[in-house]
Amino acid sequence: MSAPVGIDELLERVRAGYTRVTAQEAYAASRAGALLVDIRYQALRERDGLIPGALVVERNELEWRLDPQGSHRAAQATSHDLQVVVICNEGYASSLAAASLHALGLHRATDLTGGFQAWKSAGLPVTPTGSGPAGG
């Protein structure tokens, strides 16, 4: 039996399996037809806003919604060749999610280095949700 793997090592291993993208690269990919998938939980989306055009899928539903062969797939899950950029808040959970999508055969899945916070910091488009705290 092998020794347990810590989360830092696991992240390193899964990230070695694909090329992560920067915020600018994710934006360019979306303009070229890639699907941006926001897996942040609702409170973060309400607090920080949304990326225009991104598909919002809760993390626990991701595989069911993006499997092109699945009975619960989103309309956008059209092919295993679909380029998918998974976005979480800071770029950690999205790495594990992208690896999971690779296991489903979505070989062009990747994630955004730094997550939504990197997107926002880069000055890329964000739509306020309008339900955050006043003056927030």
Image: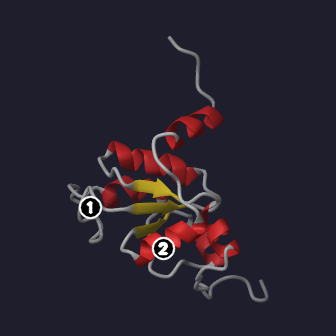
Q: Are marks 1 and 2 in contact (CB under 8 Å)?
A: no
Q: Classify 10 Å Cα crowding around label 1: few (below 14), some (14-19), many (20 and above).
A: some
Q: CA distance from mark 1 to mark 2?
A: 28 Å
Tell me the mark number nearer the camera, choosing from 1 and 2: 2
Q: Residue at the spot x=44%, y=65% of the render? A: 57
In percent of width and height, residue 48 lies at 66, 76
Side of 28 relative to 8 (left or right): left
Q: Residue at the spot x=51%, y=68% of the render? A: 26
Side of 53 relative to 113 (left or right): left
Side of 45 relative to 103 (left or right): right
Compared to residue 26, the image places residue 111 above or below, namely above
Compared to residue 61, the image places residue 10 above or below, namely above
| Kind of residue indicated by mark 1 | His
* Residue on which disc 2 sits: 28
Pick the front one: 120 or 68: 120
Side of 24 relative to 61 (left or right): right
* Residue on which disc 1 sits: 72
Indicate the secondary structure of the residue bearing disc 1.
loop
Q: How many marks?
A: 2
Pick the front one: 102 or 28: 28
